[in-house]
Image: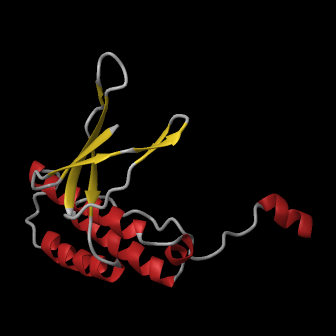
């Protein structure tokens, strides 16, 4: 089994997979460029060789602080856009935002996301989403506890 990774600049990396027994194969590869990569694999065990569909994955660099700095810069950039909301000119910005948001959230642990730092990050993400013309999204983590349901309050009386 041979895996082919194609970098954003078009450089091909062919990596043979190792057989782990049964139906398991493993491959180890470390991307060396930031951006969108394409990946596929081939096998020649059958009469007719098989080539997989081409998949993609994104490599985003930087630690969380770096990404948050990029989010601030991006927020300034989209705030400077004209009131051209809903236009196809916003699509590239929305795609960039989605990638940046995903990279930020991938670096968060659940406890960090639910804490004070997470609250600030969620607020910053909401601000950019709103600047891109989206609706304000409520914070998924309630800031105050809900009151008990009526049936629970009645049983306490």
Q: Write down the quadrant of residue 110 in the picture.
A: bottom right
Residue at (75% x, 66% y) in the render: 148
Percent coordinates x, y for residue 87 in the rendering: 12, 50
Quarter placement of the N terminus = top left
Residue at (26% x, 66% y) in the render: 60
Percent coordinates x, y for residue 157 in the rendering: 92, 70
Residue 142 horizontal side relative to residue 146, left or right: left
Is residue 40 or residue 25 the one in the foreground?
25
- Farthest residue toward the top? 47
Percent coordinates x, y for residue 151 in the rendering: 83, 58
Residue 119 horizontal side relative to residue 96, left or right: right
Q: Write down the quadrant of residue 125 in the picture.
A: bottom left
Residue 71 against residue 98 in the figure, above or below: below
Residue 78 against residue 85 in the figure, above or below: below
Is residue 19 or residue 128 the one in the foreground?
19
Percent coordinates x, y for residue 51 in the rendering: 28, 29
């Amino acid at each position: 089994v041979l895996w082919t990774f194609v970098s954003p600049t078009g450089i091909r990396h062919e990596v043979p997979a190792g057989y782990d027994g049964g139906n398991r194969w493993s491959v180890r590869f470390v991307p060396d460029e930031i951006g969108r990569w394409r990946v596929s694999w081939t096998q020649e065990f059958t009469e007719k060789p098989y080539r997989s569909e081409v998949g993609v994955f994104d490599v985003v660099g930087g630690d969380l602080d770096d990404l948050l700095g990029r989010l601030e810069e991006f927020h300034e950039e989209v705030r400077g856009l004209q009131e051209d909301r809903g236009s196809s000119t916003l699509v590239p910005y929305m795609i960039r935002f989605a990638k940046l948001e995903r990279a930020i959230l991938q670096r968060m642990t659940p406890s960090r996301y639910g804490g004070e730092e997470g609250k600030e990050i969620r607020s910053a993400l909401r601000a950019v989403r709103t600047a891109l013309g989206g609706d304000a999204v409520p914070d998924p983590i309630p800031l105050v506890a809900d009151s008990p349901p009526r049936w629970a309050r009645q049983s306490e009386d």
